[in-house]
Image: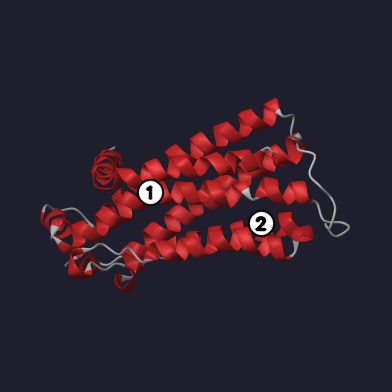
Amino acid sequence: MMEMGFSVVTAKRGLRLGLSYVVLSFIMLVPAVLLAGSSTLNLPTHGVPEGVDLSLYLSLLAVPLVSLAGMLASMPVSLLFVHDKDNGTLEYLLSLGMDQKDIFRGYLGASLLLGSILLVVGLALEVALGLVSKIGFSLLATQVVLTLALGYSVIALVSIMMSAFSALQRQPMGANQPLGIAVGALFLVAAMIVPAVVPALTLVLELGVAALVSLLTLSLLFLSGRLIRREKMLP
């Protein structure tokens, strides 16, 4: 219960620091949701290779876009972690008797909390549009499952890497640079570009990227006790 309260407080502090990122993430949901309903459009088939389902590709393109919006919404917490580490806030929390694992889980929970807002809103809009436009249930269910798996995995991955590897968190010349975010963005860009190279394997490739990120995230979570050490919380 105390850990959840710490996550909520941290999420609120993050919002005050980077509200603009959350606003921008909501703007990003617009093209993502429009793509989610693209399978019902009469798309041109001229120039499309035989066997390529263009509607499927465009529909599943919404998955990394919604996930990207979720990661962008969680970015204020990553910025806050770098800020708190450099100004001694994390060191102060340690001095109060908090364990480094508790601090890590608090920031991780805050990231997932802010990211959840965008993921839930994005999924709700996807489902609503899918029901209105009569998208097939199997495709709609695939969008939901892939978005949840990829979205939460990327958000957690960025939070873990930011806490575990000091090289991915810097504040030169007073400007926060949470470089770990680039790692998560790289996977999401891959989920957008790779299926475009082989559109016929869109579903397989999307599943592969989501599975890879999920496996990497779970592995790092399992190893977090060894990766997140007390000295990593010090300036």
Quadrant of the image occupied by residue 82: bottom left
Image: 139 above or below 230: above
Name which residue lies at 84% across and 50% down: 45
Q: Residue furthest bottom?
A: 167
Callouts 2 and 1 close, C-beta under 8 Å:
no
Image: 59 above or below 169: above
Q: Residue furthest right?
A: 50
The amino acid beneath tag 1 is: Ser
Q: How many angstroms separate mark 2 from mark 1 (CA)? A: 22 Å
Sequence-wise, the earlier of marks 2 and 1 is 1
The image shows residue 9 at horizontal and vertical percentages of 24, 40
The image shows residue 210 at horizontal and vertical percentages of 60, 56
Image: 93 above or below 35: below
Name which residue lies at 54% across and 39% down: 30
As drawn, the label of residue 59 is: none
* Residue on which disc 2 sits: 206
The image shows residue 116 at horizontal and vertical percentages of 44, 41
Q: Which of the image's four quarters has the N terminus?
A: top left
Name which residue lies at 51% across and 65% down: 186
* Residue on which disc 1 sits: 74
